[in-house]
Structure formats: C-alpha cells, structure tokens
Amino acid sequence: MSTQDPASYEPTRVEAWLLRLGTAGALLAMLSRGGRWWMLPLTLLFLIAGVGLLFLQSIHYVAPFIYMVF
C-alpha cells in the first residue's frame, strides 16, 4: 500500500497514454497501477469475445442467431 495522497497522484506517461484509450485503457492502467496482472487473461478473453461478437453480427447469415441467443 502506498502512503501517497490520492489527490496528489500523477499518472506515469504510460498510464496517461492508456487513459486516453477510453474504458479499456482505464482498465489496463488500473491493472498496471494496482499490480493485478492476474486479471489480464480474463480481460483479454472478454475483449476477444466482444470483438468476435461484433464481427459475427456483421455477417448477415449469422446475425439472426446471435440476436436470438442474446
């Protein structure tokens, strides 16, 4: 645990770059700052599944089945 005041916290250059990426970047910045690297495989799995679903819904003959399940 850090004894640093949270109000005076300055993000590092990498964290500042990650925070510009949006929600996924904020999640990765939190993982790097908090030392929770064990969550990285789960996060990658969710990102890959989300991108896969976005790709599959663009295929016209697969999209009705995706909408039917969800």
Image: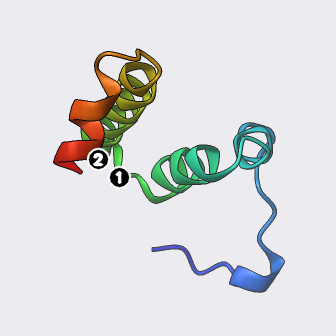
Which residue is rendered at x = 40% and y = 52% of the image? 35
Q: Secondary structure at mark 2?
A: helix
Q: Is residue 45 visible?
A: no
Tell me: residue 52, above or below residue 26.
above
Q: Is 16 situated left or right of 35 in this image?
A: right
- In the depicted view, which residue is nearer to us: 70 or 42? 70
Categorize mark 1 by other alpha carbons within 10 Å: few (<14), some (14-19), many (20+).
Answer: few
Image quadrant in which the N terminus is located = bottom left
- In the depicted view, which residue is nearer to us: 11 or 25? 25
Tell me: residue 46, above or below residue 9.
above
Residue of label 2: 39
Q: Is 47 situated left or right of 67 in this image?
A: right
Q: Is 28 situated left or right of 4 in this image?
A: left
Residue 7: image x %, image y %?
78, 84
Q: Are marks 1 and 2 in contact (CB under 8 Å)?
A: yes
Residue of label 1: 36
Q: Residue furthest left?
A: 69
Mark-to-mark CA distance, 1 and 2:
6 Å
* Type of amino acid at the residue the image marks with label 1: Arg
* Type of amino acid at the residue the image marks with label 2: Met
Colouring rule applied to residues: rainbow
Which residue is rendered at x = 53% and y = 56% of the image? 30
Q: Secondary structure at mark 1?
A: loop
- In the depicted view, which residue is nearer to us: 62 or 28? 62
Residue 40: image x %, image y %?
33, 38
Residue 22: image x %, image y %?
70, 49
